[in-house]
Image: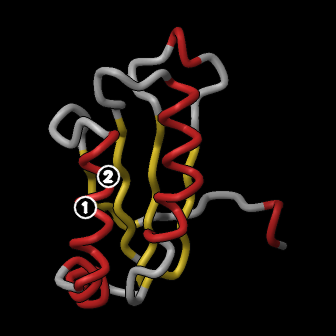
Amino acid sequence: MPKIVDLLVRKDGYSHEEFAERWQGDHADIAKDLPGLKRYVTSVPTRPEDAEYDGVLELYFEDMASLGEAFDSDIAAEVQADAAEFIDLEAGPRLIVEETVQLDEMHD
């Protein structure tokens, strides 16, 4: 199951709190409707003043074809346009990875 992992940096002019509220609020309401999205996780640092990034985004898809279709969709264009308002899209790295769970005591 491939997933996208983005390390996010807020745009200048946004406090970390403003960024997190927008990202996990109105933006999440749009992004969760990406076609084929199986799991959507947002994480913010517990000590943002000491962190290099403002958030970690994880988007899970059934396969690479589903991931590609999601980002070719009209919803993806809307998600990207909204994100560009408060995220510095060029600042943080993006990885597309294949997750291997070594331990998961939360879902046994």
Asked if residue 35 lies left or right of residue 72, the reply is right
Q: Is residue 62 above or below residue 42?
A: below
Q: Is residue 75 above or below residue 98?
A: below
Query: Residue 61, located in which quarter of the rendered image?
Result: bottom left
Report the side of 78 relative to 14 (left or right): left
30 sits left or right of 72 in the view: right
Q: Residue at x 34, y 21 (%)?
A: 13
Q: Position of residue 42 (x, y in %)?
A: 55, 51
Q: Please tell me in which quadrant of the rendered image residue 2 appears.
A: bottom left
**Residue at left 82%, top 62%?**
106
Of the pair 54 and 20, the residue shown nearer to us: 20
Residue type (three-letter) at the residue carrying disc 1: Gln
Which residue in the structure is indicated by mark 1? Answer: 80
The residue sitting at 27% across, 52% down in the picture is 95
Element under label 2? helix
Q: Disc 2 marks which amino acid?
A: Ala
The one of 19 and 48 positioned closer to us in this rendering: 19
Can you give x and y, in whole percent of width and height, for residue 93 in the image?
A: 24, 40
Task: Say if mark 2 contacts mark 1, CB within 8 Å.
Answer: yes
Relative side of 33 to 46, left or right: left
Q: Check the image and name the residue furthest to the top.
A: 50
Q: Which mark is residue 83?
A: 2
- Image x and y of residue 74, in percent: 23, 84
In the structure shown, which secondary structural element does the residue marked by tag 1 occupy? helix
Q: Quadrant of the N terminus?
A: bottom left
| Measured Cα–Cα span from mark 2 to mark 1 | 5 Å
